[in-house]
Amino acid sequence: MAYFEKHGSGPAPPAASPPHWTLAPKINSWTITPRKTGLLLLVGASIYALNVLLFGPRPHQPSRPSYLTENLPYNSTLVPHAAFQPPEALSHRYPDMVDTFTSYKYRNTCNISSLDLHAPFAPLCPDRETMLTAMASGGRIGHDAPYMPRGCDMRWFSTEEICEILSRFEKVVILGDSMMRHVVGSINVLIRKDLGYGAVTDWNFSPEERQDCFCNYQFNVKACSVQGIFKTSDVVKNDPESVACPVDSIDVISKPSPNPLRLFDTPLILFPQVEQMIRFPIPAEELDRFRALLPDKKPARPYAFIFGHGLWNDLDLQATLDWLDTLLDASVQAAPWLSPSSTKPSSPRTRSRGRAARVAAAAAKHQRNKHPFGFWPRLFLTPNAAGKEKPDEWIVSQGNKALMIFEESVGVEVRRRGLEHLGTWNMSIQSNKFDGV
């Protein structure tokens, strides 16, 4: 009794509590309630609906793309989903798909294959205008990888085809700076089938020159340009067996520098005639010698002109256009059959009216020359991209930015004058350049 008197009558009875069956069970300290259960069901249904919407079958549409489920008929010339299709299985595309250098002299020593230079694909460009655009905007997939035009392919002609094409012209007159000399050297390599010495006069080489001007080094401007071939008649005279073309159908004549224009005697046989005319104003005596190349009467076969200019005048656009206009005017003066009689060369008074007047006159001349009386194919080549070995003092005036702007501007201007244009910057930017130029 004393204990209860001291501590009371005992613990108070617990307060009334709800029945035991109404206590909600607990899982991981999170109470499940009807409201939360409904929310969970709503989220689950939403996820399921999204899954069906995104990945489930749709009415009137297969669950996977058709090109993954349908069996495509076999076509040996079609590779589904390839970036570049193989060339068409046609006879005229056979030279594009093989190494046409196999029969060339020094093929293995120089270790150059035509497939290293150009990778063929389909489709072939349908016309010349499309081809020039594709070639100017094409490039390489990696440094020194084979060149590929953009959108459609060009032909890689065999030597026999090159001879046949060049024989269609009375002359192919190539005018310009050192870049044009390399173009002529490359043509000589192809028509002589000689990768080692095709561009140079190897028949009179010293032992040192045979070593220094071999394979790619035959294009060395400092060491080998003096030994470049400037007339195919020289090859016929000194090494006739090396010319693959019929000797009565071609002749290559190149005019070298140190003198910007140096003319040789009339060729014995016909083929491209190359004039190096790099200065402007062009001296009167050089223009007279140029006019003497053109007959006053229309020949049986057309004359073709290839122009190249830019680096020798630090990519001065106006100087290049004045140089070109002077040569075009001189051509029409010497050979009126090159254009309609209504086309008159621009006079000094016209030139004095300023750039706007010259552009307007050039545009008018282009309109009149759309269908000339004489077939007058003319092509302008702009310089290639600069390499890492280009001297630092030329980076601003002849660097890649200046080259790109020059190419775009020249393309616009020469087309106004009725010429076609082939840019070489894009096709050469990822190629190795011997001296960076």
Image: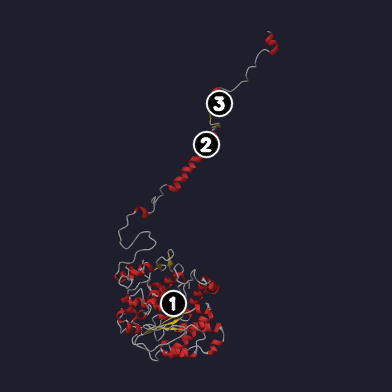
Q: Amino acid at mark 3?
A: Leu
Q: Secondary structure at mark 2?
A: helix
Q: Which label number is shown at residue 38?
A: 2
Between discs 3 and 2, the one toward the N terminus: 3
Q: Secondary structure at mark 3?
A: loop
Q: Secondary structure at mark 1?
A: helix
> Depth check: 113 or 13 in front?
113
Image location (x, y in percent) of residue 422: 44, 75
Judge depth for marks 1 and 2 and give the one in front.
Answer: 1
Residue 341 visible in the picture:
no
Image location (x, y in percent) of residue 367: 46, 82
> Depth check: 9 or 75 in front?
75
Mark 3 sits on what residue?
23
Q: Amino acid at mark 2?
A: Gly
Asked if 93 appears above or below 417 in the picture, the reply is above
Image location (x, y in percent) of residue 350: 54, 88
Discs 3, 2 touching: Cβ within 8 Å: no
Between discs 1 and 3, the one toward the N terminus: 3
In the picture as drawn, the residue positioned furthest to the top comes out as 1
The residues bearing labels 1 and 2 have C-alpha atoms spaced at a distance of 89 Å
> Depth check: 393 or 373 in front?
393
The residues bearing labels 3 and 2 have C-alpha atoms spaced at a distance of 20 Å
Mark 1 sits on what residue?
223
